[in-house]
Amino acid sequence: MSRNPVRSKRPQATSRQPADQGNPADDAIIDQALALYGSEAATAVAYCGLDAWFEDEEEEFRRFTRIFRRLRN
């Protein structure tokens, strides 16, 4: 049976913070990603987000999406 890649079967949780607001844990991930991958940090974080999506880890997916948005801005 194929999975619908657009929607998760889990209930949608509301985000605790806006996408542009800093979180100390997110800041640490951003700093480490920039140190490891430099200008490709956004791509590396996007791959982490995809991995979380395919593993049905909604909270981690949202976290990496939030981090990706901050790196792209």
Image (spheres, grey):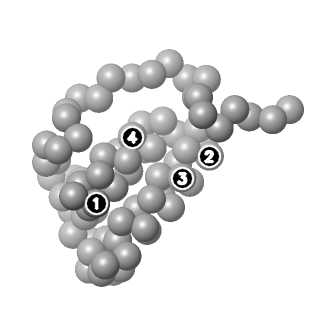
Determine which of the numbered discs, if any, sits on residue 72 in the image.
1
* Distance CA(mark 1)–CA(mark 3): 16 Å
Q: Do the numbered discs 1 and 4 sit on residues whose CB atoms are within 8 Å?
A: no
Q: Position of residue 12 (x, y in %)?
A: 45, 22
Determine which of the numbered discs, if any, sits on residue 29 in the image.
none
Q: Do the numbered discs 3 and 2 sit on residues whose CB atoms are within 8 Å?
A: yes
* Distance CA(mark 1)–CA(mark 4): 15 Å
Q: Position of residue 72 (x, y in %)?
A: 28, 60
Residue matched to label 4 = 62
* Distance CA(mark 2)–CA(mark 1): 22 Å
What amino acid is found at the position of numbered circle 2 in the picture?
Phe
Circle 3: element type: helix
Circle 1: element type: helix
The crowding category of the residue bearing disc 1, from other C-alpha atoms within 10 Å (few below 14, some 14 to 19, many at least 20), is: few
Write down the quadrant of residue 4 in the picture: top right
Q: Do the numbered discs 4 and 2 sit on residues whose CB atoms are within 8 Å?
A: no
Residue at image position (50%, 61%) is 47
Q: Do the numbered discs 4 and 3 sit on residues whose CB atoms are within 8 Å?
A: no
Mark 3 or mark 4, which is nearer the start of the sequence?
A: 3
* Distance CA(mark 4)–CA(mark 3): 10 Å
